[in-house]
Amino acid sequence: MNDYRFIFHYLSAFLGFIVAIVLFLYIQTSLAGLTITLFEDFSTKGACSCDSCIMDKMEDDKWFFVRYNRNIQLMLNKKNSVLRQDVLKWWKGLQYVSSRSIQKQDALSNYKAVVEKLFSLFPDKEHYSDAGPDRCRTCAVVGNSGSLKGSYSGPLIDFHDFVIRINKAPTKGYEKDVGSKTTHRFIYPESAVDIDSSTHLVFCPFKILDINWLISAFTTKHIKYTYMKVRPTIKANKNKVMILHPAFIKYVYDSWLQKHGRYPSTGFLTLIFALHICDKVSVFGFGPTSDGYWHHYFDRSLTNFRRGSHGGDFENKTVHNLHLKNKIIMYKGW
Ligand code: C5P
């Protein structure tokens, strides 16, 4: 009997010992797993999954940090269409309605009705709120500079997830230097061109008449004149139309241009927009001639940006600074 009791005690102690070891190993493994998870979440995972991200160590660069507002409204939709008083006042200051244009009354008086009409025609969505540690979205912003000529940048430009072009810039016949892919094209009425059905038309409303033109271009086609002759209509996919929020245009002017010029150029707006929807931004075709003109790779036009509505010098300096601070990669062409 004593022998049985001894064996029983011995077995219980042994089983207890085994259970203790198993429990110990289990807890160790779980803790290790937890440590790895924590380490992954907070140490190895950056702001995005690219090798470097725009939002990496944001706070370390004061110049960038004070300018960049990650909560700014990018696109207009029905929900965010009511404009802040300061935005409204500034936007109103930009309105220029020519005596020859169809709209002679206070262009902002019917803003609410215009917004209603706008989103009965075009998608009423929130766009690009998908940033996170698992995303690596690369963007090429392609300006219209003559420096692109002979640059052989085409294949590199097309390699990006998003290729964003501006105004009338063509690709046909220039593929070797500028590529052939266009995911987004920024335009305003006076710079409008036909747009491929797979491309997003990103519309820059510098004035409310511009929004009226957009509606007209896809419906009645009756607006043919703003401050100059404009195309009454264009080919574009209306399900891919996006409209920049006036608050975004003011933000770019206030924060990034420190109120230089009267309002930002389309190219500069595009570049700052890319900083907000991409994780990595490459910039092509930005830069004037040595004597200070915005020239094109596709025509002979020369614009003296120092005399126009845009703070061209300040824009160029800011773009250069973004490059120095590794927030964009500038490709200068040859
Ligand atoms: O001439 P356009 O306004 O169509 O050019 C689009 C944009 O490309 C400009 O707003 C400007 O930001 C950029 N650009 C440039 N250097 C040039 C020509 C254009 O930086 N020589």
Image: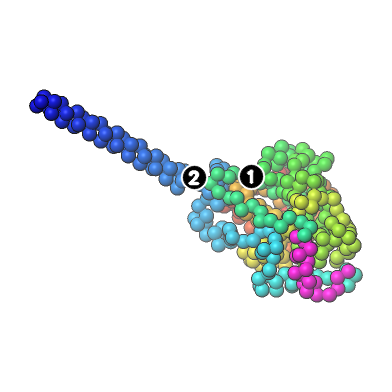
Camera-side residue: 317 or 257? 257
Quarter-of-image position of residue 103: bottom right
Kindly identify the residue that appears in the image at 62 percent across and 61 percent down.
72
Range covered by the magenta-colored residues: 102-119
**Residue 20 to residue 262: above or below:** above
Measured in 3D between alpha carbons, the distance from the residue under mark 1 to the one under mark 2, in whole angstroms, is 18 Å
Circle 1 is placed at which residue position? Answer: 138
Circle 2 is placed at which residue position? Answer: 45
Q: Badge 2, how many Cα within 10 Å: few under 14, some, many 20+?
A: some
Quarter-of-image position of residue 192: bottom right
Figure colour scheme: rainbow
Q: Is residue 118 magenta?
A: yes
Kindly identify the residue that appears in the image at 61 percent across and 53 percent down.
129
Judge depth for marks 1 and 2 and give the one in front: 2
Camera-side residue: 130 or 60? 130
Query: Where does the N terminus fall, quadrant-wise?
Result: top left
Q: Position of residue 141 (x, y in %)?
A: 69, 49
Q: Badge 1, how many Cα within 10 Å: few under 14, some, many 20+?
A: some
Query: Where does the C terminus fall, quadrant-wise?
Result: top right
